[in-house]
Image (tube, rainbow, N blue to C red):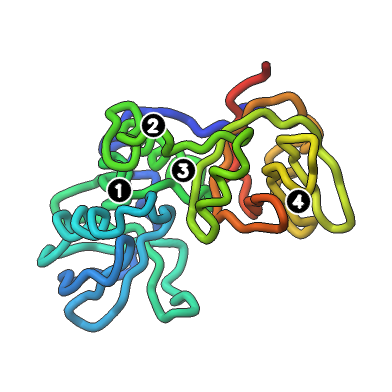
Amino acid sequence: MAACSLMVVAAVGPASAEGCAFEPQGEGRVAAIIDARSFRLEDGREVLLAGIEPAGTERTKNISALSAIVIGREVTLSGRDDAPDRYGRQPAFVFLASSQTPVQAQLLAQGAALVSGAVTDKECASALAAAETAGREAKAGIWADSSAIKNAESPGDILTGIGRFMVVEGKVLSVRQAGATTYLNFGRNWTRDFAVTIPRRVLSAFEAAGIVLKSFENQRIRVRGWVESRTGPRIEALHVGQIEVLGGN
């Protein structure tokens, strides 16, 4: 199971970054920054950086980090397809003309973004995870704050991040199914304590990865996702990559 669910840590460089070089989706010059993970090209196209999510609350710093890398620069785009998202943005992995390392990896290494966990390609996911690990070990950006990773045993602290993308670590005490949802419970009070929810519709992805959800019991895991409140704090895991096994007791 660990081989399927653990994020692989590797050196960030051209060899690992090539894993995110999918089908070409065009090129252009960056004219303006929209937010911390999207920008507009001179031809009017809006591009969303795939595979990453906002880091913390330092919105201005994160926007400045992206601007410093891409504003006024020629970039090439790659991805599975060029279908726009519901906001009309083109999700893509972005490369400067002179680099084989995606802009996403540069932002992760600076602690200006977090891995989303949604990338299913193993090589690309590994490259992004390695970049985030490098940033964390260097205490760059968001990682300069010791509380950047939340403790699953402190639900009140997690609740302060409702509506934000967060990383939480803790020991899974129990795995229970209720209706169409599987719960990874980190406390004994199921209505108040932190839990990860996994809807039935995505169970096949975990099964395909060789992961039996019950095996998460008594394991320490790191989970990432958008925090919501259903009495207690919750993160919904829609992708296998959102959960990283850290070990047992």
For residue 168, what is the image quadrant? Answer: top right
Label 4 environment density (alpha carbons within 10 Å; few <14, some 14–19, many ≥20): few
Residue bearing mark 4: 204
Q: Earlier in the sequence, mark 1 or mark 4?
A: 1
| CA distance for labels 2 and 1 | 15 Å
| CA distance for labels 4 and 2 | 36 Å
> Toward the viewer: 137 or 147?
147
What residue is rendered at 26% in x and 41% in y? Answer: 110
What residue is rendered at 31% in x and 76% in y? Answer: 46
Q: Examine the rendered structure and indicate whether residue 37 appears above or below residue 99.
A: below
The secondary element bearing badge 1 is classed as loop
Left or right, 198 with respect to 16, comes to: right
Q: Position of residue 187 (x, y in %)?
A: 74, 35
The secondary element bearing badge 4 is classed as helix
Residue 82 appears in the figure = yes
Q: Amino acid at mark 1?
A: Ala
Left or right, 2 with respect to 192, comes to: left
The mark closer to the camera, 1 or 4, is 1
Q: Amino acid at mark 2?
A: Ser
What residue is rendered at 32% in x and 44% in y? Answer: 108
The secondary element bearing badge 2 is classed as loop
User: Looking at the rendered structure, which numbered label has been put on residue 125?
Assistant: 3
Residue bearing mark 2: 146
Residue bearing mark 1: 112
The mark closer to the camera, 1 or 3, is 1
